[in-house]
């Protein structure tokens, strides 16, 4: 359900009412051309040459903002006037006469359900329709949508992304900006998980990419994913080139090797440390007074606050890696488990 007015929802709402431009790409280009095709816009450098099907798809999917040039031009009075003229002479003609009222009604409904629009704006926009000027109404809503935030903001850092973030050392391998910010103790997402070999390339480009390195059977396999800063993500996926693909493949291989090497060193050291602790615990003979042990098992994720997703992910990995190792060491000794567990609990209570 559409419940927010932006360029994505406006295109989708208008698309269903158009006769000729009733497909997503066609509707998007048709509407944005109200500004982009103006002579003044072209002469003064505001025009964007990239209103491809992919760009429109990314706008409708709320992956991209409206191009900056179009947004900047929309604030000029002469461009505003010509946009209204475009809606009178072009957009209104393409509205299905049988669906015109439904389409306009859906636009009004979109305005009313959007809780982020101020009441004054909710009143001023429909007033053009109430006065019988539907072309002006749609043009004003369009101009408003152009200037609203279209890109969907997801600040939640998913714990599934932690391995890719750790691999990149939590910074973009291209621009070296931080991929995760901490604001008031909360992890804020500043990255996008990016397909190195994108799954939506046209056949010609995909063929060129495959000559460098074959397309993966699964585009979302770890080897084909890399964590990038949002701007680097946008820049790459908007129009990926073979040269960029080569660069990303090399970067991915390098950071993967480095991460694996670091993990290997840490693993060796940790195994030695675990062995040292277990050996020391096995020497306990004169144990402290036994404390009652509670065996209320919890899943690892239940032991961490949501913002500690990085620590949680690393702990889960270590549990998987070292549980069997610890079990094997203990099984090969004659140590009493309850004695060790009691000592560990007493020690933790003193911390």
Image (cartoon, rainbow, N blue to C red):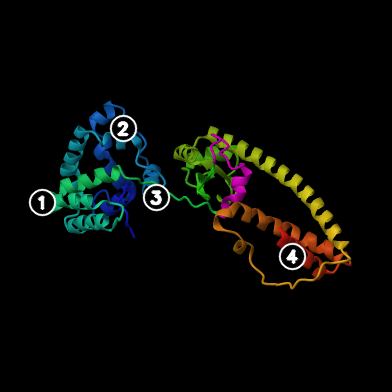
Residue 70 screen position, x and y as percent:
30, 36
Tag 2 near tag 3, CB within 8 Å: no
Label 4: which residue? 345
Choose the circle earlier in sequence order: 3 or 4: 3
**Left or right of 294, for residue 198:** left
Residue 85 screen position, x and y as percent:
16, 39
Label 2: which residue? 47
> Of discs 3 and 4, which sits in the foreground?
4
Tag 1 near tag 4, CB within 8 Å: no
**Cα–Cα span, label 2 and label 3:** 22 Å
Label 3: which residue? 61
Residue 66: quarter of image: top left
Q: Tell me if residue 19 is in the magenta stretch.
A: no
Q: For the view shown, which residue lies furthest in the top direction?
A: 43
Q: Secondary structure at mark 3?
A: loop
**Left or right of 19, for residue 289:** right
At horizontal 47% and vertical 50% (from top left) the residue drawn is 155
**Cα–Cα span, label 1 and label 4:** 76 Å
**Left or right of 239, for residue 93:** left
**Left or right of 258, for residue 340:** right
At horizontal 74% and vertical 47% (from top left) the residue drawn is 266
Choose the circle earlier in sequence order: 2 or 1: 2
The magenta segment is 159-178
The residue nearer to you, when weighing 12 against 127, is 127
């Amino acid at each position: 359900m559409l419940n927010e007015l932006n360029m994505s929802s406006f295109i989708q709402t208008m698309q269903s009412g158009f006769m000729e431009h009733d497909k997503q790409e066609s509707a998007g280009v048709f509407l944005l051309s109200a500004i982009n095709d103006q002579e003044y816009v072209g002469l003064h450098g505001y025009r964007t040459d990239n209103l491809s099907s992919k760009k429109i798809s990314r706008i409708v999917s709320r992956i991209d903002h409206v191009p900056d040039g179009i947004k900047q031009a929309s604030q000029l009075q002469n461009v505003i006037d010509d946009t209204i003229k475009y809606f009178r002479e072009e957009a209104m003609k393409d509205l299905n006469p049988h669906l015109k009222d439904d389409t306009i009604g859906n636009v009004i409904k979109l305005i009313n359900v959007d809780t982020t629009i101020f009441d004054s704006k909710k009143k001023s926009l429909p007033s053009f329709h109430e006065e019988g000027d539907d072309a002006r109404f749609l043009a004003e809503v369009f101009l408003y949508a152009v200037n609203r935030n279209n890109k969907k903001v997801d600040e939640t850092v998913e714990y599934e992304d932690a391995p890719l973030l750790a691999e990149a050392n939590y910074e973009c391998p291209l621009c070296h900006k931080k991929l995760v910010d901490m604001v008031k103790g909360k992890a804020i997402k500043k990255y996008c998980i990016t397909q190195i070999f994108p799954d939506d390339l046209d056949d010609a480009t995909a063929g060129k990419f495959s000559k460098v390195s074959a397309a993966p059977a699964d585009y979302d396999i770890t080897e084909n994913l890399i964590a990038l800063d949002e701007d680097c993500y946008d820049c790459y996926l908007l129009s990926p080139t073979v040269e960029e693909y080569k660069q990303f493949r090399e970067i991915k291989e390098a950071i993967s090797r480095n991460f694996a090497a670091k993990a290997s060193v840490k693993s060796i050291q940790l195994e030695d440390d675990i062995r040292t602790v277990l050996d020391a615990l096995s020497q306990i003979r004169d144990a402290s007074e036994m404390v009652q042990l509670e065996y209320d098992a919890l899943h690892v994720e239940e032991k961490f606050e949501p913002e500690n997703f990085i620590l949680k992910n690393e702990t889960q990995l270590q549990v998987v890696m070292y549980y069997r190792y610890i079990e094997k060491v203990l099984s090969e000794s004659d140590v009493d488990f309850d004695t060790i567990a009691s000592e560990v609990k007493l020690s933790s209570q003193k911390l």
